[in-house]
């Protein structure tokens, strides 16, 4: 991609309207200072003294964070939070982000706020070290009335956005935002608005999804295709191309240190190797940066290869951000690609 094409594509981001449907969680970081040791009088156990607490939207919210960093003009999160303290923090964090419209985000007493609580040991001159995470999740099925409300939001937004991202983060089916009820609406939207970009990613795999534009990693592709999890690059090419033909939509596969591969329904396959590692890395959030950048680029007229190049650069930027789930802005992409 030339610098001129980069500017042509990225300058369109400010006019984009993108909905993000999925499991928004609160990423809460507890920064622990090990130089403030203490022992509990009551239990005799070591005390971790937290000296700083910071929060940001996570899971589908990480995709949203990346879209904000890219300068997307209008963003519509579609999901839910509980009527709890974590929900207050999550909604406040979303509201503080530029261009975010919360008219289609539901706060409900019927759900608790999905939360990743991440204790970090923070010492001067050292990379943050994460301890065991403390997760708060929903273990019961999402009520039908919540699903119906979310489905109506998706239908309403489908007529006013350039793209919809669907992010299914929960480990147990039917406990999050992307229920069968919501998927049925997405399937209807994909039929009625065939030119609308709908890009889907799911932690549990995409087998139950309608034929949309898919983004997945190698393990998820292997599971989808009922193949050995040890796919080599040629296998990834073959399986991704077959899935793209079947879906009639592009398929994108992240391949860790081997980069990203894209396959189109017409048989075009593009592989862009990962950029060299420049320092210590943390891969958390890289896939969400890929999703955000693919969506923006494709919605702005990029070719499949151009979209993969931009997503690959974004992933390289994010993995070098330690102690947080990072983002990649247009200026950062420009510097990395043409420094």
Image (cartoon, rainbow, N blue to C red):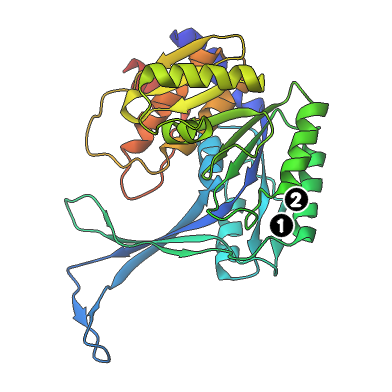
Mark 2 or mark 1: which comes first in sequence?
A: 1
Q: Quadrant of the N terminus?
A: top left
Hey, which residue is sitting farthest bottom in the picture? Answer: 42
Q: CA distance from mark 2 to mark 1?
A: 8 Å
Where residue 184 appears, as percent x and y from the top left, is: 77, 41
Answer few, some or many: residues within 10 Å of disc 2's Cα (few below 14, many 20 plus, some between 14 and 19): many
Q: Residue 238 appears at what percent x and percent y?
A: 47, 16
Residue at 53% from the left image edge and 9% from the top image edge: 268
Compared with 172, 43 (above or below) is below
Of labels 2 and 1, the one closer to you: 2
Residue 23, position as x, y percentages in the image? 59, 51
Report the side of 159 relative to 268 (left or right). right
Residue at image position (75%, 50%) is 150
Of residues 245 and 106, the one drawn nearer to the viewer in this rendering: 245
Residue 35: image quadrant is bottom left
Q: Is residue 33 left or right of residue 16?
A: left
| Spot occupied by residue 260 in the image (x, y as percentages of width and height) | 42, 23
Visible residue check, residue 25: yes
Q: Give the image quarter of residue 332.
A: top left
Side of 282 relative to 198 (left or right): left
Q: Which residue is mark 1?
A: 106
Is residue 309 visible in the rendered image? The answer is no
276 and 214: which is toward the camera: 214
Q: Is residue 4 above or below residue 86?
A: above
Dots 2, 1 in contact, CB < 8 A: yes
Kindly identify which residue carries mark 2: 150
């Amino acid at each position: 991609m030339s610098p001129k094409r980069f500017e042509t594509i990225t300058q369109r981001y400010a006019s984009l309207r993108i909905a993000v449907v999925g499991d928004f969680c609160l990423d809460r970081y507890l920064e622990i200072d090990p130089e403030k040791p203490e022992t509990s009088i009551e239990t005799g156990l070591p005390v971790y003294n937290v000296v700083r607490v910071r929060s940001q939207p996570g899971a589908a919210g990480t995709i949203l964070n990346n879209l904000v960093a890219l300068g997307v003009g209008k963003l519509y999160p579609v999901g839910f939070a509980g009527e709890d303290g974590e929900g207050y923090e999550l909604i406040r964090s979303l509201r503080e982000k530029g261009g975010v419209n919360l008219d289609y985000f539901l706060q409900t007493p019927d759900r608790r706020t999905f939360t990743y609580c991440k204790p970090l040991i923070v010492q001067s001159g050292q990379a943050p070290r994460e301890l065991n995470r403390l997760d708060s999740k929903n273990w019961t099925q999402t009520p039908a009335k919540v699903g119906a409300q979310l489905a109506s939001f998706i239908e309403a937004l489908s007529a006013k956005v350039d793209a919809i991202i669907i992010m299914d983060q929960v480990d147990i089916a039917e406990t999050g935002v992307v229920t069968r009820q919501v998927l049925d609406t997405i399937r209807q939207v994909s039929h009625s608005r065939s030119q609308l970009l709908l890009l889907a990613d799911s932690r549990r795999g995409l087998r139950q999804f309608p034929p949309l534009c898919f983004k997945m990693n190698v393990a998820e592709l292997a599971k989808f295709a009922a193949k050995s999890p040890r796919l080599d690059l040629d296998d990834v090419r073959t399986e991704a191309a077959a899935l793209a033909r079947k879906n009639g939509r592009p398929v994108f596969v992240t391949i860790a240190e081997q980069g990203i591969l894209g396959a189109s329904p017409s048989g075009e396959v593009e592989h862009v190797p990962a950029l060299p590692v420049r320092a210590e890395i943390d891969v958390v959030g890289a896939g969400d940066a890929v999703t955000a950048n693919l969506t923006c680029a494709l919605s702005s007229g990029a070719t499949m290869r151009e979209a993969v190049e931009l997503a690959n650069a974004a992933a390289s930027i994010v993995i070098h951000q330690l102690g947080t789930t990072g983002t990649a802005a247009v200026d950062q992409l420009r510097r990395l690609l043409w420094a």
